[in-house]
Image (cartoon, grey):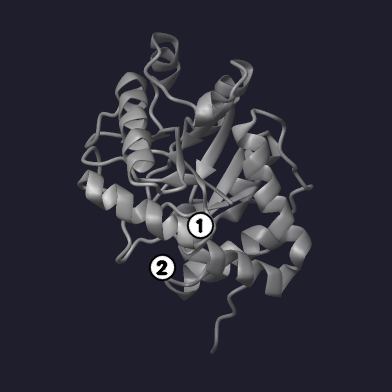
Protein backbone atom coordinates (compact mmCIF):
# COMPACT_ATOMS: atom_id res chain seq x y z
CA UNK A 1 0.00 0.00 0.00
CA UNK A 2 1.10 3.59 -0.71
CA UNK A 3 0.36 6.59 1.51
CA UNK A 4 0.62 9.80 -0.53
CA UNK A 5 0.24 12.29 2.35
CA UNK A 6 2.27 12.06 5.56
CA UNK A 7 4.20 14.34 7.91
CA UNK A 8 6.96 11.85 8.67
CA UNK A 9 10.08 13.96 8.09
CA UNK A 10 11.58 14.83 11.48
CA UNK A 11 11.71 18.27 13.05
CA UNK A 12 10.50 20.42 10.15
CA UNK A 13 6.76 20.90 10.75
CA UNK A 14 4.00 19.76 13.14
CA UNK A 15 4.60 16.07 12.38
CA UNK A 16 7.45 13.85 13.62
CA UNK A 17 9.73 15.73 16.01
CA UNK A 18 12.77 13.43 15.94
CA UNK A 19 14.22 10.68 13.76
CA UNK A 20 13.04 8.22 16.43
CA UNK A 21 9.48 9.54 15.95
CA UNK A 22 9.83 9.08 12.19
CA UNK A 23 11.05 5.49 12.62
CA UNK A 24 8.18 4.74 15.01
CA UNK A 25 5.69 6.13 12.49
CA UNK A 26 7.25 4.07 9.70
CA UNK A 27 7.02 0.93 11.85
CA UNK A 28 3.33 1.63 12.48
CA UNK A 29 2.77 2.19 8.75
CA UNK A 30 4.43 -1.13 7.91
CA UNK A 31 2.05 -2.90 10.31
CA UNK A 32 -0.85 -1.54 8.22
CA UNK A 33 0.75 -2.78 5.01
CA UNK A 34 2.08 0.62 3.92
CA UNK A 35 5.55 0.32 2.38
CA UNK A 36 5.83 3.55 0.40
CA UNK A 37 5.12 6.96 1.93
CA UNK A 38 5.25 10.35 0.25
CA UNK A 39 6.60 12.81 2.81
CA UNK A 40 4.57 16.02 2.47
CA UNK A 41 5.86 18.69 4.88
CA UNK A 42 3.91 21.92 5.11
CA UNK A 43 4.79 25.03 3.15
CA UNK A 44 2.87 27.90 4.71
CA UNK A 45 3.30 31.00 6.87
CA UNK A 46 4.56 28.87 9.76
CA UNK A 47 6.74 26.29 7.99
CA UNK A 48 9.04 27.18 5.10
CA UNK A 49 9.95 23.80 3.63
CA UNK A 50 11.40 24.13 0.12
CA UNK A 51 12.29 21.44 -2.42
CA UNK A 52 16.05 21.30 -1.81
CA UNK A 53 15.73 20.82 1.96
CA UNK A 54 12.91 18.27 1.54
CA UNK A 55 15.04 16.12 -0.79
CA UNK A 56 17.92 16.17 1.72
CA UNK A 57 15.63 15.17 4.60
CA UNK A 58 14.07 12.35 2.54
CA UNK A 59 17.53 10.93 1.77
CA UNK A 60 18.51 11.08 5.47
CA UNK A 61 15.33 9.34 6.61
CA UNK A 62 15.63 6.60 3.98
CA UNK A 63 19.15 5.91 5.24
CA UNK A 64 17.90 5.71 8.84
CA UNK A 65 15.09 3.33 7.79
CA UNK A 66 17.60 1.12 5.99
CA UNK A 67 19.87 1.00 9.02
CA UNK A 68 16.87 0.12 11.23
CA UNK A 69 15.70 -2.63 8.83
CA UNK A 70 12.26 -1.03 8.44
CA UNK A 71 10.75 -1.96 5.08
CA UNK A 72 9.35 1.47 4.21
CA UNK A 73 10.56 3.81 1.46
CA UNK A 74 10.07 7.58 1.71
CA UNK A 75 9.36 9.56 -1.46
CA UNK A 76 9.52 13.37 -1.74
CA UNK A 77 6.49 15.64 -1.69
CA UNK A 78 5.20 18.85 -0.17
CA UNK A 79 1.94 20.36 1.12
CA UNK A 80 1.83 24.00 0.02
CA UNK A 81 -0.95 26.19 1.42
CA UNK A 82 -2.50 27.96 -1.56
CA UNK A 83 -0.85 31.32 -2.28
CA UNK A 84 -0.63 33.67 -5.27
CA UNK A 85 3.13 33.34 -5.83
CA UNK A 86 3.21 29.56 -6.13
CA UNK A 87 3.68 29.71 -9.91
CA UNK A 88 6.80 31.88 -9.61
CA UNK A 89 8.12 29.59 -6.84
CA UNK A 90 7.62 26.61 -9.16
CA UNK A 91 9.77 28.45 -11.72
CA UNK A 92 12.42 29.02 -9.02
CA UNK A 93 12.52 25.31 -8.19
CA UNK A 94 11.20 25.73 -4.63
CA UNK A 95 8.10 23.58 -5.07
CA UNK A 96 8.28 19.81 -4.71
CA UNK A 97 5.68 17.82 -6.63
CA UNK A 98 4.63 14.36 -5.43
CA UNK A 99 7.52 12.01 -6.20
CA UNK A 100 8.66 14.46 -8.92
CA UNK A 101 5.48 13.75 -10.91
CA UNK A 102 3.04 16.21 -12.47
CA UNK A 103 0.86 15.97 -9.33
CA UNK A 104 1.00 18.81 -6.81
CA UNK A 105 -0.78 19.11 -3.46
CA UNK A 106 -2.73 22.28 -2.74
CA UNK A 107 -4.05 23.00 0.76
CA UNK A 108 -6.89 25.45 1.40
CA UNK A 109 -7.42 27.42 4.62
CA UNK A 110 -9.74 25.46 6.91
CA UNK A 111 -12.66 27.89 6.77
CA UNK A 112 -12.85 29.17 3.19
CA UNK A 113 -11.75 28.84 -0.43
CA UNK A 114 -9.81 31.88 -1.68
CA UNK A 115 -11.43 33.81 -4.56
CA UNK A 116 -8.46 33.30 -6.88
CA UNK A 117 -8.50 29.49 -6.46
CA UNK A 118 -10.18 28.58 -9.75
CA UNK A 119 -7.81 30.79 -11.77
CA UNK A 120 -4.71 29.49 -9.96
CA UNK A 121 -5.68 25.83 -10.40
CA UNK A 122 -6.30 26.54 -14.10
CA UNK A 123 -2.87 28.20 -14.43
CA UNK A 124 -1.20 25.20 -12.78
CA UNK A 125 -2.85 22.91 -15.31
CA UNK A 126 -1.68 25.13 -18.17
CA UNK A 127 1.86 24.57 -16.79
CA UNK A 128 1.30 20.80 -17.10
CA UNK A 129 0.67 20.21 -13.40
CA UNK A 130 -2.36 18.47 -11.88
CA UNK A 131 -3.45 20.05 -8.59
CA UNK A 132 -4.69 17.74 -5.83
CA UNK A 133 -6.82 19.52 -3.21
CA UNK A 134 -5.99 17.95 0.16
CA UNK A 135 -8.60 17.16 2.82
CA UNK A 136 -11.49 19.12 1.24
CA UNK A 137 -13.80 17.35 3.70
CA UNK A 138 -12.36 19.49 6.51
CA UNK A 139 -12.98 22.84 4.79
CA UNK A 140 -16.06 24.53 6.29
CA UNK A 141 -16.98 26.42 3.09
CA UNK A 142 -16.87 23.23 1.01
CA UNK A 143 -19.03 21.38 3.55
CA UNK A 144 -21.66 24.12 3.23
CA UNK A 145 -21.18 24.69 -0.51
CA UNK A 146 -20.08 21.40 -2.11
CA UNK A 147 -20.87 22.83 -5.54
CA UNK A 148 -17.64 24.85 -5.24
CA UNK A 149 -15.61 21.63 -5.05
CA UNK A 150 -17.67 20.07 -7.85
CA UNK A 151 -16.72 22.97 -10.18
CA UNK A 152 -13.01 22.64 -9.36
CA UNK A 153 -13.05 18.87 -9.97
CA UNK A 154 -15.09 19.30 -13.14
CA UNK A 155 -12.36 21.65 -14.38
CA UNK A 156 -9.56 19.14 -13.79
CA UNK A 157 -8.52 19.33 -10.14
CA UNK A 158 -8.26 16.14 -8.10
CA UNK A 159 -8.87 15.70 -4.38
CA UNK A 160 -7.56 13.58 -1.49
CA UNK A 161 -9.68 12.62 1.52
CA UNK A 162 -8.07 11.78 4.85
CA UNK A 163 -8.46 8.24 6.19
CA UNK A 164 -9.18 9.51 9.71
CA UNK A 165 -11.99 11.71 8.37
CA UNK A 166 -13.71 8.71 6.81
CA UNK A 167 -13.36 6.78 10.05
CA UNK A 168 -15.00 9.52 12.13
CA UNK A 169 -11.98 10.78 14.07
CA UNK A 170 -12.75 14.40 13.08
CA UNK A 171 -16.43 14.09 14.01
CA UNK A 172 -19.71 12.90 12.50
CA UNK A 173 -20.21 15.86 10.15
CA UNK A 174 -16.81 15.46 8.50
CA UNK A 175 -17.27 11.68 8.30
CA UNK A 176 -20.65 12.11 6.56
CA UNK A 177 -19.21 14.62 4.07
CA UNK A 178 -16.22 12.36 3.36
CA UNK A 179 -18.59 9.52 2.49
CA UNK A 180 -20.59 11.87 0.25
CA UNK A 181 -17.38 12.81 -1.59
CA UNK A 182 -16.66 9.15 -2.31
CA UNK A 183 -20.26 8.56 -3.43
CA UNK A 184 -20.19 11.56 -5.76
CA UNK A 185 -16.82 10.66 -7.36
CA UNK A 186 -15.42 13.89 -5.95
CA UNK A 187 -12.30 12.33 -4.49
CA UNK A 188 -9.54 10.32 -6.11
CA UNK A 189 -7.19 9.39 -3.26
CA UNK A 190 -7.40 8.22 0.34
CA UNK A 191 -4.30 9.07 2.38
CA UNK A 192 -3.37 9.25 6.04
CA UNK A 193 -2.17 12.83 6.63
CA UNK A 194 -0.49 11.16 9.63
CA UNK A 195 1.47 13.40 11.99
CA UNK A 196 2.25 10.92 14.80
CA UNK A 197 1.06 7.58 16.18
CA UNK A 198 -0.96 8.98 19.09
CA UNK A 199 -3.79 11.22 17.88
CA UNK A 200 -2.99 11.62 14.16
CA UNK A 201 -2.04 8.13 13.02
CA UNK A 202 -2.45 6.34 9.67
CA UNK A 203 -5.88 4.63 9.85
CA UNK A 204 -5.50 3.58 6.21
CA UNK A 205 -6.45 -0.04 6.78
CA UNK A 206 -9.52 1.01 8.77
CA UNK A 207 -10.59 3.50 6.09
CA UNK A 208 -10.22 1.04 3.22
CA UNK A 209 -12.18 -1.58 5.18
CA UNK A 210 -14.95 0.98 5.63
CA UNK A 211 -14.92 1.79 1.90
CA UNK A 212 -15.05 -1.93 1.11
CA UNK A 213 -18.09 -2.43 3.35
CA UNK A 214 -19.95 0.65 2.03
CA UNK A 215 -18.98 0.73 -1.64
CA UNK A 216 -17.36 -2.60 -2.48
CA UNK A 217 -13.88 -3.79 -3.40
CA UNK A 218 -13.85 -1.91 -6.74
CA UNK A 219 -13.56 1.38 -4.85
CA UNK A 220 -10.74 0.04 -2.69
CA UNK A 221 -8.94 -1.03 -5.85
CA UNK A 222 -9.50 2.38 -7.45
CA UNK A 223 -7.93 4.28 -4.56
CA UNK A 224 -4.99 1.89 -4.28
CA UNK A 225 -4.45 1.92 -8.04
CA UNK A 226 -4.55 5.72 -8.17
CA UNK A 227 -1.76 5.95 -5.59
CA UNK A 228 0.32 3.59 -7.73
CA UNK A 229 -0.41 5.59 -10.88
CA UNK A 230 0.45 8.86 -9.11
CA UNK A 231 3.94 7.80 -8.00
CA UNK A 232 4.57 6.48 -11.53
CA UNK A 233 3.55 9.87 -12.99
CA UNK A 234 0.72 8.31 -14.99
CA UNK A 235 -2.88 9.44 -15.48
CA UNK A 236 -5.10 8.40 -12.59
CA UNK A 237 -8.57 6.88 -12.79
CA UNK A 238 -11.33 9.52 -12.70
CA UNK A 239 -15.01 8.68 -12.58
CA UNK A 240 -17.56 11.29 -13.69
CA UNK A 241 -18.22 13.61 -10.73
CA UNK A 242 -21.79 14.36 -9.68
CA UNK A 243 -23.21 17.21 -7.63
CA UNK A 244 -23.89 16.65 -3.94
CA UNK A 245 -27.44 17.74 -3.22
CA UNK A 246 -27.74 19.75 -0.05
CA UNK A 247 -30.66 18.74 2.15
CA UNK A 248 -33.28 21.47 2.32
CA UNK A 249 -33.89 23.00 5.70
CA UNK A 250 -37.56 23.34 6.56
CA UNK A 251 -38.77 26.02 8.93
CA UNK A 252 -41.14 24.81 11.60
CA UNK A 253 -43.97 27.13 12.55
Q: How many numbered marks does the figure carry?
A: 2
Residue 227, x across and y down, in percent: 62, 43
**What residue lies at 51% left-to-right and 57% top-to-bottom?**
137
| Label annotation for residue 170 | 2
Residue 31, x across and y down, in percent: 47, 62
Q: CA distance from mark 2 to mark 1?
A: 10 Å
Residues packed near mark 1 inside 10 Å, few (<14), some (14 to 19) or many (20 plus): many
Residue extending farthest to the top is: 92
Using the image as rendered, state which of residue 14 and residue 112 is in the foreground.
14
Using the image as rendered, state which of residue 24 and residue 124 is in the foreground.
24
**Residue with the mark numbered 1:** 137
Relative side of 33 to 111, left or right: right
Residues packed near mark 2 inside 10 Å, few (<14), some (14 to 19) or many (20 plus): some
Q: Is residue 151 visible?
A: no
Is there CB contact under 8 Å for labels 2 and 1? yes
Residue 70, x across and y down, in percent: 41, 49
**What residue lies at 21% left-to-right and 47% top-to-bottom?**
17
- The C terminus sits in image quarter: bottom right
Using the image as rendered, state which of residue 211 and residue 85 is in the foreground.
211
**What residue lies at 47% left-to-right and 36% top-to-bottom?**
106
SS of the residue under disc 1: helix
Question: Residue 25 lies in what quarter of the image?
Answer: bottom left
Q: Is residue 141 above or below residue 102?
A: below
SS of the residue under disc 2: loop
Residue 136, x across and y down, in percent: 51, 51
Disc on the earlier residue, 2 or 1: 1
Amino acid sequence: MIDIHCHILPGIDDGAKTVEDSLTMAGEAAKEGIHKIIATPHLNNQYDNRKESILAKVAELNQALKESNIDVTILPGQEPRIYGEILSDIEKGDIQTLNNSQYLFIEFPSNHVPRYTEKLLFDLQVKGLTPIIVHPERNSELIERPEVLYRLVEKGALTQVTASSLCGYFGKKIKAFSIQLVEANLTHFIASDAHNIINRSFKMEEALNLIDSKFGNDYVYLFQENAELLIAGRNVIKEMPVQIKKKKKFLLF
